[in-house]
Amino acid sequence: MAGSRRNEGPLAPYVVAVLVALAVAAYALFPVAQSLLGAAPVGEGPAQQQAEVLEYVAPQVDAPAPEPDPVTIDLMMIGDILGHRSVWESGQEADGSLNYDHFFADIKPDIEASDIAIVNQETILGGTELGLSGYPVFNSPQEFGDAEAAAGFDVVLHATNHAVDQGKTGLLNTIHFWESKHPEVTYLGISETQEHYDQIYVYEKDGFRVAILNYTYDTNGIPLPEGMPWAVNLFDHDKVVSDVSRAREMADIVVVCPHWGTEYQLYPDEFQTDWARTFLDMGVDVVIGGHPHVIEPVEVMEREDGHRMVVFWSVGNFVSTSPGCENMIGGLAKVRLVKDGDAAWVSSYSFTPTVTQRNPGYHGITAFKLPTYTEEQAAANGIATADPGKGWSRQWCVDFCSQVLGDGFDRESCVLEGELPAPEGADEELAAAA
């Protein structure tokens, strides 16, 4: 049946060519089809395919940065290092050298725990080359400063009524001692140059800035060195107002450490209260005073707009041989400062009384914190015989502190403590945790 057979001969080459073209096209289009259908290319597993698809479909979005935690600065200050003769004699070693580390042994843990530790160096450190002397025209050994640096103090105050007891030489000896031997310590209140006099000291921690200023009411009538009107920071109204204004612009918190008040008076005088109102009006946050040689109350002053200022009217003496039992009580003032965002404030404050241990001889002068002071130590304190009739004892110290510091003083813990609320807009829970 020849009519029913297909004639395949002439078509075969064309069929083969079409099949080859289709195969080539399929091979070329295969990766495109894989991409469109989500299939994995040859040699790539499901994990790589998934990563590529996720990167295309749902790119990662960075989470917003967390709010920074509040920053805290713990600041403390002790009272006067008053260089009476027995005070500097207490550090005389057998080989003739001088060492005063014993002054600060009991409070060294407090110093180490603070970000800023301040000491009021009442008497000038003119050094042995000028001859050491006590009351009324003092000259103290520079080894006082060595002990202060060794204990860990960061700031030493020199704006006092005894700043020029030894004239220009004593002043410059003190400045050069700090600058050459302990450049890590900041001295305030005295200056060799106008440039230093105009500077504002600012401490900084994690972007939190605290300015500290220091002034004295007088220099006991002794004129400033000739040609050096900037030698000592005095309570000059224009100077103080200018400094505080600049400090407010430069820092988050302003602390003023004034040498003011009436000696042996247990409450602030008119000079103190007038200046305190000025400080409050200008936005100062903390005032820690010295000079009266006795402690005075602690107070929180408040402006009409709600701004608060903590005032330690006087922290008294730390070491001295002043004549009375009252002069043996000083204080360790502490404040905790907090910055949260743009807000900065004093979150808490405390005042721990200290007791000068006054005995003759080697290491006979030192100081202890009242909370751990014992009746045995009180019985051995030379002030009991130096100022008889007052009934000196540890209990006398507690009663005296309660009388001066008032209801805020806890007779059991022997500490006065207080807290201040966070300003509006600050996170109180985070600040409290800090």
Image (spheres, grey):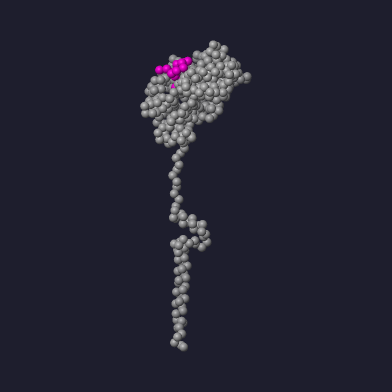
Q: How many marks?
A: 0
Residue 361 within the magenta-colored segment of the rendering: no
Q: Position of residue 186 (x, y in %)?
A: 49, 27
Residue in view at x 51 percent, y 18 percent: 399
Residue furthest to the top in view is: 389
User: Residue extending furthest right?
Assistant: 94
Report the front residue among 299 and 250: 299
| Residue located at (43% from left, 32% from top) | 422
Asked if residue 263 lies in the magenta stretch, the reply is yes
User: Please, is residue 247 above or below residue 140 in the view?
Assistant: below
Vertical relation: 70 (above or below) 54? above
Q: Position of residue 373 (x, y in %)?
A: 57, 21
Above or below, 46 relative to 243: below
Residue closest to the far left: 304
Q: Is residue 316 visible?
A: no
Say which residue appears at 46% left-offset and 88% top-offset.
1
Magenta: main secondary structure: loop
**From which residue to which does the magenta span run?**
258-270
